[in-house]
């Protein structure tokens, strides 16, 4: 199932199995090119698709036009999903999906500035609500940049890279300039195997300028205010810190009963939620060979009982 623009949805059968077994109203918080939404609509769900990227939204609208009123596209940030549903007068939904990270359309469009292989501006904004990498570099000091690289990139060479980037900041114009400065800051013998030496730095900057962890945390907190009884939340993440936040939030919802022994009815909320994925779900080898982006995907799901 290829998408115009080349973005293949990750774990599509698992997502459809979790969110389309009975016809439902589902929010796709990361519509992208609409690969997951298309599967859900084909199975009879109604879908409200949110994306912060107007270009992705335009492509998805075109692709999913044939579903008519069953599909609604909204430009916005999924961190505001509760307010977005309020605007549509929707109190509760039966499913909510977020498939985090960038789409292939964003990565492969040089002028969006996500790629260290294609020269583009220092941008990396997923949507107009973010700040650009250029703006971030103009505002941060070395300590702050180091923290971003450590935290979101798990980059052990963060101190050298932060120093080199800020020392050269005025001369950096393109993503390939930035990638070169990063590569030169890491001793050649220590370059990571199998990935470009600037991969972690680019990931860290992307997560920072788009406040991706902040949006995820707010979304996770909103889940109880979104789902009807029997409703399910599904999150696909690509970063260990994101997965840790999802695991913790779902475990907190579906916590073991904390009531004193002997109480006739559970009053601590434990009976309200069930983990649908005791263990994290990873794509199999066959999917990874077809869709290399799936390699680091981790899916978790929870249900309101
Ligand atoms: C991995 S792609 C989604 C692909 C989609 N599931 C598909 O099958 O085509 C992630 C999309 O989510 C969007 N996105 C990321 N963070 C977002 C946020 N906080 N709010 C809204 N959209 C977001 C990005 O702009 C991108 O288009």
Image (cartoon, grey):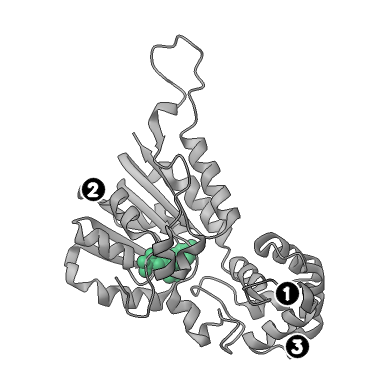
Mark linked to residue 40: none
Identify the mark nearer the N-term, 2 or 1: 2
Residue extending farthest top? 262
- For marks 2 and 1, give the CA distance: 46 Å
Provide the residue designation for mark 2. 21
Neighbour tally class for label 3: few under 14, some 14-19, many 20 plus, Cα within 10 Å: few
Answer with left or right where residue 74 lies relative to residue 295: left
Where's the C terminus, which quadrant? top left
Answer with left or right where residue 185 lies relative to residue 99: right
- Foreground disc of the pair 2, 1: 1
- Foreground disc of the pair 3, 2: 2
Image spot of residue 263 (x, y percent): 44, 11
Neighbour tally class for label 2: few under 14, some 14-19, many 20 plus, Cα within 10 Å: few
Mark linked to residue 191: 1
- For marks 3 and 2, give the CA distance: 54 Å
Residue at 22 percent of width and 55 percent of height: 45
Decide: is 305 above or below 148: above
Q: Quadrant of ligand 1?
A: bottom left
Under tag 3, what secondary structure?
Answer: helix
Neighbour tally class for label 1: few under 14, some 14-19, many 20 plus, Cα within 10 Å: some
Tell me if the residue at label 3 has its CB under 8 Å from ligand 1: no
Where's the N terminus, which quadrant? bottom left
Identify the mark nearer the N-term, 3 or 2: 2
- For marks 3 and 1, give the CA distance: 25 Å
């Amino acid at each position: 199932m290829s998408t115009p623009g080349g973005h293949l949805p990750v774990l599509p059968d698992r997502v459809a199995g979790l969110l389309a077994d009975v016809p439902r109203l589902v929010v796709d918080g990361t519509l992208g090119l609409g690969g997951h939404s298309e599967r859900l609509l084909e199975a009879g769900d109604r879908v409200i698709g949110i994306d912060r990227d107007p270009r992705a939204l335009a492509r998805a609208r075109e692709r999913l036009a044939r579903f008519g009123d069953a599909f609604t596209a909204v430009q916005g940030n999924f961190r505001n999903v509760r307010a977005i549903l309020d605007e549509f007068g929707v109190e509760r939904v039966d499913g909510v999906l977020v498939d985090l990270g960038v789409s292939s359309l964003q990565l492969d469009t040089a002028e969006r500035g996500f790629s260290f292989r294609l020269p583009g501006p220092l941008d990396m904004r997923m949507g107009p609500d973010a700040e650009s990498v250029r703006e971030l570099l103009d505002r941060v000091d070395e300590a702050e940049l180091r923290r971003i690289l450590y935290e979101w990139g798990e980059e052990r060479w963060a101190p050298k890279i932060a120093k080199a980037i800020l020392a050269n900041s005025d001369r950096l114009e393109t993503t390939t300039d930035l990638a070169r400065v990063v590569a030169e800051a890491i001793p050649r013998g220590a370059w990571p195997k199998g990935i470009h030496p600037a991969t972690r730095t680019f990931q860290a900057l992307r997560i920072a300028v788009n406040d991706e962890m902040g949006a995820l945390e707010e979304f996770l907190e909103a889940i109880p205010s979104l789902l009807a009884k029997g409703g399910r939340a599904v999150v696909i993440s690509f970063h260990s810190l994101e997965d840790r936040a999802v695991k913790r939030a779902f475990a907190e919802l579906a916590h073991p009963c904390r009531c004193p022994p002997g109480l006739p009815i559970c009053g601590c909320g434990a009976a309200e939620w069930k983990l649908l994925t005791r263990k994290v779900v990873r794509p199999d080898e066959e999917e990874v060979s077809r869709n290399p982006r799936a390699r680091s995907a981790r899916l978790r799901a929870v249900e309101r009982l």
